[in-house]
Amino acid sequence: MRFRRVFYTGVIVLVLSGPFLSAQETAKNPAVPAAAQARVSKFGQYSGYSEAKYDSWVRTSQYLTMRDGVKLAIDIIRPAVNGKPADEPLPVVWTHNRYRRAFLAKGRLISIADSYDIRNLLKHGYVAASADCRGSGASFGKAVGIWTPEETQDAYEITEWLAKQPWSDGKVGMFGGSYLGVTQIMAASKKPPHLKAIFPAVPLFDIYSVGAQGGIFKEDFVRTWSELTRRFDVDEIAAPVDDDKNGVLLKKAIEEHKGNRSLIAAVSPLKFRNSRDELTGAMPNLVWQPAGYIKEINESGIPMYLWCGWYDAFTRDGFLMFRNFTVPRKLAVGAWSHSPKDADILMEAFTLLSVETWRWFDYWLKGIDNGIMNDPPIHYQVMVGPKQNVWMTASQWPLLEAKDVPYYFGEGKSKSAKSSNDGSLTKKVPTGTEGKDVYKVDYSATTGTTTRWDNTVGGEFGYPDQGPNDVKGLTYTSAPLTGEVAISGHPVVHLWVASTAADGDFFAYLEEVKDEGLSLYITEGALRASHRAVQAPPYDNLGLPYHRSFDTDVKDLEPGRPVELVFDLEPTAKAFKAGNRIRLTITCADKDNAATPVLDPSPSVTVFRDAVRASFISLPVVSSAEKEASGNFSLVRIFFLLLLVVVLVIAFTLFMRSRLKKP
């Protein structure tokens, strides 16, 4: 595996918590009284609502004993003035941490107090805490799965313990991202009486749709995640708690961790959404996830702020949670990946995250009327180009103004791709009866090793030019756009196919082709043909096709017989520039990211694009200068035609008058 993708110090901790600061350091700038600051409270900006009374913090750590006797390690970070902790009860925010609550890096202890996104909270009077999940960090116990009922019950007990401490005012919130984002939502399903608000960043909703997208196992993603957690559990160990001076208890905990069940071992046998886990007897793809507890989460009434990214592996999940949860909620989606690597994007993401976390907890835990709930419920970034992204707001999703516009696979060459077909993408509905493209499956096709999937488990991020991958599939490319086309929502592919094999994996990539030929990745979707059956979803699926993928739903292809595959791509908000092209690429493999069975010889796949079996992608268009340009051209043409008619009429009238005047 590509371990070089994972930073020694734990990139996931960085992603979830933000840039490091010095532990227990005094603030470099003196606190400015709130009265002297302008009162500003809007997305990404906050000042004047409270004073930064504290300039440092004090960290202590200990073990908590759970109902079954398992001891969990927890850090308590209390705000302080000149090193003296606050003597007044304060609200508490905490994170249920799967990736070590604290660890040593180059001889220095790193805890959540070193993270940017809680600095404002500590300075403005919040106690922070971080607990190692059972089977991880310095906690005892064994991990048998992810987000298990035992782990979720721990979250309930920790929340209630925090509420009862003398330095706590009884109001508790939760924060953190990725795994730590999901632990918050799962905790809410248990309805802890003192949990008043949560702020889950980049969380998932439905694990099967992520780990087995369209029925296709994301083996590299799951294996890397599995190996990363194993390293944190056993090799790159957590810091011991205060009373464990010689690390004896930590060593005992690590010995128990060696019995942890690897994630890849737990997940890989679960081929279907209703697969049963032999060890626990549970159906993890139905119950070890927020999607299995919609009713309970809504009953809790616990407000949540969902923080997501367009290039995350869990992008769709954020919108599904916003739609299905009815608690007070917010959603923000930026033009970043799960763990941003670009310095500018990282700074933008975590500056905004820090401010919004602070605003959220001030409102729900301190009762400060800062107006955050009067803001539009959704903030999202439209991707225009490097350094040109634009923040927009919405009251609901999908957007009311988004219109589904079909772009059909067409005949003729686009003269923009070196693929075997170089097909066209057009709004013109197919009229012929013979339109089709035949493709010999190329199993070497790949989107690379720095994808949204790699980045979600700590790898690098940055899609290369997709031209080399386009060559290995079928491409359908529009003519150069005469004006900007902006989409915001969920593209959906309708793909009519036949194959010489009994099954096959189909990947669809939406790309923007720049005028110089560079092909830029925008988003993707995938479906295994045998999982093509569409059923009624168990939750509001935003009107998108839902593939239940139970074992009873699977149906092989009949070689040579056409079937329709309908599946959505990860949502996006993108403005395609005038002069560029829109491209959809179809492949049958993504070797670095998906576990597609390799057949020998490679099967032949036929993609149909005729009047009866029209293949197309439906794009959620919110504005199109092409349409406006076309309309303006038509109006101008009509104007000149009318003007010409008037001129001709006048000329004819003058001519007839001159004839009548002649003797």
Image (cartoon, rainbow, N blue to C red):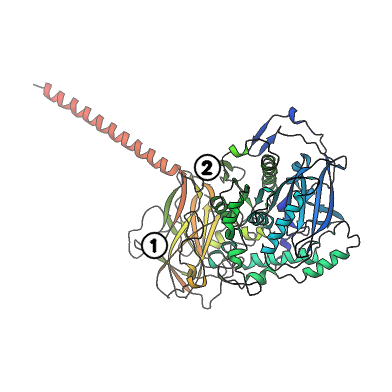
User: Which residue bears the numbered disc 1?
Assistant: 609
Q: Residue at x 69, y 41 (%)?
A: 355
Mark 2 / mark 1, whichever is N-terminal: 2
74 sits to left or right of 221: right
The amino acid pointed to by label 1 is: Arg
Q: Is residue 104 above or below residue 123?
A: below
| Whole-percent x, y for residue 473 in the image | 51, 65
Q: Nearer the viewer, residue 63 or 77?
A: 63
- In the picture, residue 494 is in which quadrant? bottom left
Farthest bottom residue in view: 600
User: Which residue bears the numbered disc 2?
Assistant: 395
Task: Determine the CA span between mark 2 and mark 1.
Answer: 37 Å
As helix, strand or loop, the secondary structure at mark 2 comes to: loop
Q: Are marks 2 and 1 in contact (CB under 8 Å)?
A: no
Q: Residue at x 52, y 52 (%)?
A: 512
- In the picture, residue 376 is in which quadrant? top right
| Whole-percent x, y for residue 374 in the image | 58, 37
The amino acid pointed to by label 2 is: Ser
| Whole-percent x, y for residue 342 in the image | 68, 50
636 sits to left or right of 645: right
- In the picture, residue 650 is in which quadrant? top left
Q: Is residue 518 visible?
A: no
Quadrant in which the C terminus appears: top left
Q: Is residue 222 visible?
A: yes
As helix, strand or loop, the secondary structure at mark 1 comes to: loop
Q: Is residue 399 above or below residue 152?
A: above
133 sits to left or right of 248: left
